[in-house]
Image (cartoon, grey):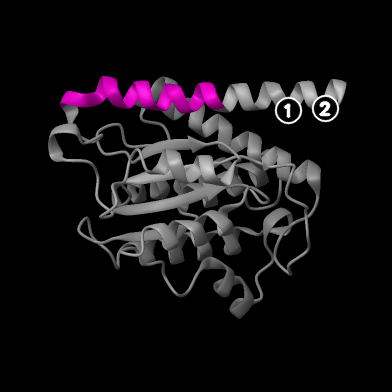
Amino acid sequence: MRIAISGCQNSGKTTLLTNFLQVWSQYTTPEKTYRDLIKEKQLPHSSLATKDTQLDILSFMIQQQGDYNKDSKVVYDRCPIDNLVYTLWCHDKGIDGFDKTFVDQTISLVKESMKSLDIIFLLRYDNSIKIEEDGLRDTNLEYIKEIDNIFDVLYQQYYHNLVADIFFPKNDSPCIIPLPTSGQQRIDIISEYIDPTGNLPGDDVSIFNPNNISELEALVQQQKNALEMEQKEKALYNKFKI
């Protein structure tokens, strides 16, 4: 199975990847990541990204996905949908080179690349994680939240209107599962989709079995409700300090 962990900065992707590999040791993760590419080529990135940067990173991610097949057990730190999110942010800000033609080209490439993924676990911004400079991370909170919002917009389009076939191929899209911020809850929810052997539950209950779409929708709605409740609790805490 081909899995990606996606989301904005300060959402706990690296921690979840580490925990995932500890629980499901059958899986591997590519030794080289987009971070290595940025360092090697000294690419301007994040809020300073250029058209060339985004093309280089997208090409790297797509080529890397080509190294694996549906029988692989691989988990990626980010995937092409992340690249699209940052490109959409640059387009919205009117950054040079990020015109509609470039965005449409990116959407087309990303949508096709989604066929090489089975599950995307989506993480949201976690304000309990201290924002720390690591040489690559953009530490501007407003920027991080804007990126987080774009991820949510794409997820909402996937969840409510997948048949529109805008960002995800409607007949061959990965399952996108939003996760809460709690580390243990994340592992618990992932366990609903991946058994101890690293596989999906039996074929008769597989989330990819077209006969079980209603079950998949119920599971996704359950995670969505949990996220909404968690966000409401955080809002109450921030407002009343309870």
**Mark 1, residue position:** 234
Residue at 50% x, 55% y is 78
Residue stretch rendered in magenta on the structure: 211-226
Q: Quadrant for residue 27, please give it.
A: bottom left
Dot 2 falls on a residue whose secondary structure is helix
Left or right position of 211 against 30: left
Magenta region, main secondary structure: helix
Tell me if label 1 and label 2 are in contact, CB under 8 Å. Answer: yes
Query: Per the image, is 223 magenta?
Result: yes
Residue at 74% x, 56% y is 138
Q: Quadrant of the C terminus?
A: top right
Query: Per the image, is 170 magenta?
Result: no
Q: Quadrant for residue 40, please give it.
A: bottom right
User: Can you say whether 125 is above or below 199 in the image?
Assistant: above
Specify the amino acid type for callout 2: Asn
**Mark 2, residue position:** 238
Where does the image place residue 140, in percent across and percent down from the top left?
81, 50
Where does the image place residue 93, in percent across and percent down from the top left?
72, 42
Left or right position of 132 against 1: right
Q: Quadrant for residue 22, please give it.
A: bottom left
Which mark, by number, is residue 29? none
Between marks 1 and 2, how big is the CA–CA gap?
6 Å
User: Can you say whether 40 is above or below 183 in the image?
Assistant: below
Q: Nearer the viewer, residue 79 or 29?
A: 29
Where does the image place residue 232, in percent across and percent down from the top left?
68, 21
